[in-house]
Image (cartoon, rainbow, N blue to C red):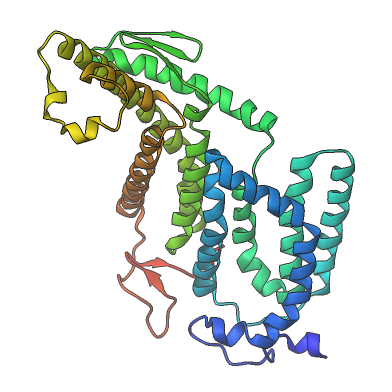
């Protein structure tokens, strides 16, 4: 009988206008969740520990810390938007839990680490279905799937995807630089510039940006109340935006490399240019006894994938990606606004986003 009434109260409880975490996730509900959640953590303690260690030491996966936080935000957006009114345990949740654990045992025995760890998502989904029921599961399955972005890949899978992206970044940059009047030749993933070789290494493949941009795209898709097709467009566009931003990053590094090289030649000839306007306190951050050697160290720092300056280009591209996605949203609103009254919900109609877009029936 208790299961039929549900953890959140009677099935005939009055529908509330807004989702209220305090009303739905009560202390009693939390206490009933703790044993199952504890068993989940116990079953996956080693993958969770390994992931955190990789997030801490590998900059390619540093975004892993943010993914659970963003997943909670997406869950909040969907709960606020769809307003499920019942928390009713469902015994069918044991099916994905047991299947996931069996696959984990099998993959671990066969030493397939990544497939074994991906079963974590299946088990988490099963736990949600078991404790909260179908109504909540239909709302929360997307935040659970979003957690896949925090799981580090095996090096063989990572390198298999990174290598084609490296080649793509190098090839596009080779075509773009001559438009700017620069001389460049490509040998594989190495760009031969006037200033010297620029290697488009694994760190420059754009795969790091791809993970971050997909995470950003999914978050932006669910920050606003939009139809399914618009959300799919926003999420799908994160991939070409990542490739574009990575090409911009490699191009900027190539331009900066040549400009530093030309400036070092001017300094050696006694006709310093832009470097003379930079305060000496800045140049003291770089090694060398004179300005020429400090400029050379500056160039090496820019091209070093592990340097903070090099990684700063990546953070700058995140800002560019955010701007491009905002422009994309504006274009969608400009050309695909549906007819209707602007503003919020009326007393007899569904809530509408700005522009009159209905908000009911969203996935």
Q: Position of residue 315 (x, y in %)?
A: 38, 42
Residue 105 drawn above or below residue 59: below
Residue 327 drawn above or below residue 72: above
Residue beneath the point at 32% across and 25% down: 287
On the picture, is 152 further left or further right than 336?
A: right
Depth order, front residue of 12/315:
315
Residue 9 drawn above or below residue 298: below
- Location of the C terminus by quadrant is bottom right
Residue beneath the point at 27% across and 22% down: 294
Depth order, front residue of 106/18:
106
Q: Position of residue 58 (x, y in %)?
A: 57, 40
Q: Position of residue 176 (x, y in %)?
A: 33, 18
On the picture, is 206 further left or further right than 7?
A: left
Depth order, front residue of 106/331:
106
Report which quarter residue 273 is drawn in. top left
Q: Position of residue 141 (x, y in %)?
A: 65, 62
- Location of the N terminus by quadrant is bottom right
């Amino acid at each position: 009988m208790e299961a039929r009434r549900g953890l959140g109260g009677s099935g005939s409880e009055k529908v509330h206008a807004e989702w209220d975490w305090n009303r739905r996730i009560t202390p009693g509900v939390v206490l009933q969740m703790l044993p199952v959640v504890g068993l989940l953590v116990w079953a996956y303690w080693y993958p969770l520990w390994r992931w955190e260690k990789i997030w801490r030491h590998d900059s390619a996966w540093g975004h892993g810390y943010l993914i659970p936080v963003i997943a909670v935000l997406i869950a909040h957006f969907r709960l606020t938007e769809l307003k499920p009114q019942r928390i009713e345990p469902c015994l069918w949740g044991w099916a994905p839990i047991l299947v996931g654990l069996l696959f984990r045992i099998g993959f671990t025995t066969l030493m397939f680490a990544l497939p074994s760890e991906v079963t974590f998502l299946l088990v988490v989904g099963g736990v949600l279905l078991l404790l909260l029921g179908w109504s909540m599961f239909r709302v929360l399955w997307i935040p659970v799937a979003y957690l896949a972005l925090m799981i580090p890949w095996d090096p063989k899978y990572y390198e298999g995807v990174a290598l084609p992206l490296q080649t793509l970044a190098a090839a596009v940059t080779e075509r773009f630089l001559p438009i700017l009047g620069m001389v460049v030749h490509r040998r594989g993933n190495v760009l031969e510039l006037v200033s010297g070789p620029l290697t488009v290494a694994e760190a420059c493949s754009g795969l790091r940006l791809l993970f971050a941009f997909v995470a950003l795209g999914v978050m932006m898709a669910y920050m606003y109340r939009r139809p399914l097709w618009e959300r799919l467009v926003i999420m799908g566009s994160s991939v070409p935006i990542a490739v574009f931003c990575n090409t911009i990053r490699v191009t900027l590094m190539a331009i900066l490399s040549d400009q530093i090289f030309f400036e070092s030649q001017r300094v050696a000839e006694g006709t310093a240019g832009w470097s003379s306007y930079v305060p000496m306190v800045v140049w003291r951050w770089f090694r060398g006894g004179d300005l020429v050697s400090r400029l050379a160290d500056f160039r090496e720092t820019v091209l070093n994938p592990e340097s903070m300056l090099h990684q700063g280009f990546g953070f700058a591209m995140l800002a560019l990606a955010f701007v491009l996605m905002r422009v994309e949203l504006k274009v969608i609103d400009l050309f695909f606004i549906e007819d209707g009254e602007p503003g919020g919900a009326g007393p007899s109609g569904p809530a509408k986003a700005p522009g009159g877009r209905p908000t009911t029936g969203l996935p």
